Amino acid sequence: MAPAPDGQATPPPPPLRRHETASRRDNLNGALYSVAASLGFTITSVMVKQLGLIGIDAFQTVFVRAFFGMAVIVPLMWRLGVAPWRTDHIWIHASRALLGGLSVLCGYYAFTRLHLAEVTVISFTVPLFVTVLAVLFLGESVRWRRWSATAVGFAGVLVVARPFGGTVELASGLAVLMALCIAVSVVLLKRFPKKESQLLMLFFFLLSSGAMAAWPGVAGWHEPDAVAWLLLAGVGFCGLGSQALIIRAFRIGDASFVAPFDYVRILFAGTAGALMFAELPDLWTYLGGLLIVGSTLYIARREALQQRH
């Protein structure tokens, strides 16, 4: 699964076992939820970019977004009896929250500086980083086919970033860092028991991202007008809603069936960038995107085949 472009991706639960394969209807519904989430994430990135154009920087956006997110999450936690102090995994939560906060700051900055399609393409490198991290920290075995696909995917990142002149634009580097932070977060997620509350994960993420953005966000505060406040609220609510949709998609459908539908975000991002900001991705973005998407699809296919055997 590719990450959410706002940097707050919460990976789906472990894949279903062979005898728990989802029905055709569940898979189709899961695909629809995934497409809806992709549209929501694209709308969020459009609002983030528009905020940057009117002078609201990434720190202020993340800080206000955390406030609106907390306004939704805290009442839900209180209603369901979910308390942060009852967890036995505070250090894992803290690590994931710090990584999530860093990823959303990097992602929002990248969206304000680069084309929407370019950042979206780079965000699909999360499965590539997860492959490497799973070998290093989880002791998983990866054969040469997946290593080859991973190398091709990272070559695609170089094509998109275009460091051919010896330099890489800061925003491109931060987009890659966003993907790496989310990948480490995915690996940490494997250390949680299945019963650990996803609301609790979102709570710590919002708390961390808000705290990280608080000082620079307030120090460089740009007074929002009515339109900016609407956009800020939209970023908070649309981001959370999209995250809920993608979690739902992977809960009811087979991961191997649902995951490829997330790549529709490339189409959404390219269309939105062209219509809203006159952004036309160049040949390098298309070529790099082809390498990244092709390699991650191959890795997903190999994992699905291994699960069946």
Image (cartoon, rainbow, N blue to C red):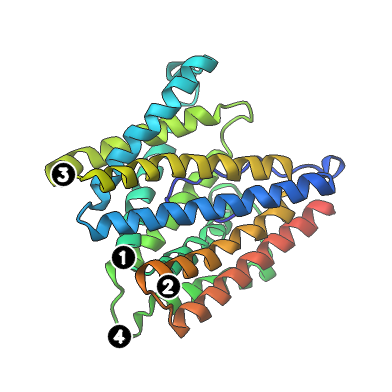
Identify the residue at the far left of this view: 219
Q: Could you tell me which quadrant the N terminus lies in?
A: bottom right
Which residue is the site of mark 3? 223
Mark 3 residue crowding within 10 angstroms, few (<14) / some (14–19) / many (20+) = few
> CA separation, marks 4 and 3?
39 Å
Q: Could you tell me which quadrant the C terminus lies in?
A: bottom right
> CA separation, marks 1 and 3?
25 Å
Could you say whether the residue bearing mark 1 is in a helix, strand or loop? helix
Task: Find residue 273 and report its horizontal and vertical position in percent.
Answer: 42, 68
Q: Dots 2 and 1: beta carbons under 8 Å?
A: no
> CA separation, marks 4 and 2?
27 Å
Q: Is residue 225 left or right of residue 298?
A: left
The numbered mark, 1 or 3, whose residue comes first in the sequence reads: 1
Q: Name the mark nearer the viewer: 1 or 3.
A: 3
In this rendered view, identify the residue nearer to me: 76 or 271.
271
Residue 4 visible:
no
Instruction: Say what amino acid the circle numbered 3 marks.
Output: Glu
Which residue is the site of mark 1? 171
The numbered mark, 4 or 2, whose residue comes first in the sequence reads: 4
> CA separation, marks 2 and 1?
19 Å
